[in-house]
Every structure is written in C-alpha cells, then in structure tokens.
Amino acid sequence: MKDTVVKTKEEWKKLLTPEQFHVLREKGTEQATTGIYNNHHEHGVYLCAGCGLDLYRSEDKYESGTGWPSFTAPIALENITTSEDNSLFMNRTEVLCRRCGGHLGHVFRDGPEPAGLRYCINSAALHFVPAK
Ligand code: FE
C-alpha cells in the first residue's frame, strides 16, 4: 500500500474526537462495554476512523464477551500491521492501521476455530459504514 497517511499530532487532533485521538494516536484503550460498536450487529464494513481504510467486515465480527468489538480476521492482512507490545507487564500483539499507523487494538490467540484469532478492536478506532 503506497498511499500512506502521515499527519502531525496537531492535524490529527483537529480531525479526531478526543477519544479517537487517544486510542488511535496515543495507543489508548476504551473502557470495556462502553464503545459504540461493542453491541453492534448491522451489516457493513468498519473503516479506520483515522484514514478511512476498510479494516473489518460485519461477517467476521463475533460475540467474544470481552466488551470490545471482536473480529476473527481483517478484510485483508495487508490493511493492518502488527507489532509486539510489552507494555503494562503483558506480552501482546498490537494491531495498527497500515495506512495511517493508527492504533486499533490487539490480536489474541483465543479466538474461534479454525483461525483461532481474536482481533480485539476499540470502537473509537473504527467508523462503520452500513452495506447498501
Ligand atoms: Fe488508518
């Protein structure tokens, strides 16, 4: 993907809500069950709230019971990047938007079969567009 989105902190602050900024640009985590897409079952696509890249599909969303939107897979692996995150005394794999580098959440290996992955994504990092 060549069209990388690069903005300064000030530019992002103008574009995003404080919560979106905290999650996407400061690697924040929204409180469990508080996100707008936690209990959300419409048919459509979840885009990056920062740059609009399509990240997840409603077909891959499932009820993990964790309080965060959970997906078994991204729309395309090349739309995300992952990075090792050893903060907060945990070993986790961070998930980021490939285009703008925004922090989305983490991916864990306790998801449903066959892939066994749980993409635990902050609602604040996403923007849902219903299917037409
Ligand atoms: Fe993005």
Image: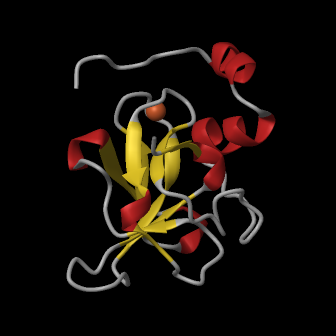
Q: Position of residue 115 (x, y in %)?
A: 22, 77
**Which quadrant does the C terminus fall into?**
top left
- View extreme (front): residue: 132
Q: Nearer the viewer, residue 16 or 41?
A: 41
Q: Nearer the viewer, residue 44 or 46?
A: 44
Q: Position of residue 94 (x, y in %)?
A: 43, 56
Residue visible at 63% across and 54% down?
A: 123
Q: Position of residue 76 (x, y in %)?
A: 24, 47
Q: Is residue 42 above or below residue 16?
A: below
Q: Is residue 103 visible?
A: yes
Tell me how many marks there are: 0
Q: Is residue 12 above or below residue 74?
A: above
Q: Position of residue 13 (x, y in %)?
A: 72, 22
Would you identify the image quadrant in which residue 109 lies? bottom left
Q: Nearer the viewer, residue 72 or 12?
A: 72
Colouring method of the image: secondary structure
**Which quadrant does the N terminus fall into?**
top left
Would you identify the image quadrant in which residue 18 lies? top right
Q: Position of 26 compared to 74: left or right?
A: right
Q: Nearer the viewer, residue 16 or 88?
A: 16
Q: Is residue 69 above or below residue 11?
A: below
Residue visible at 46% across and 50% down?
A: 44
Residue visible at 29% across and 40% down?
A: 79
Would you identify the image quadrant in which residue 84 lies? bottom left
Q: Position of 12 compared to 118: left or right?
A: right
Q: Is residue 42 above or below residue 28?
A: below
Q: Is residue 85 visible?
A: no
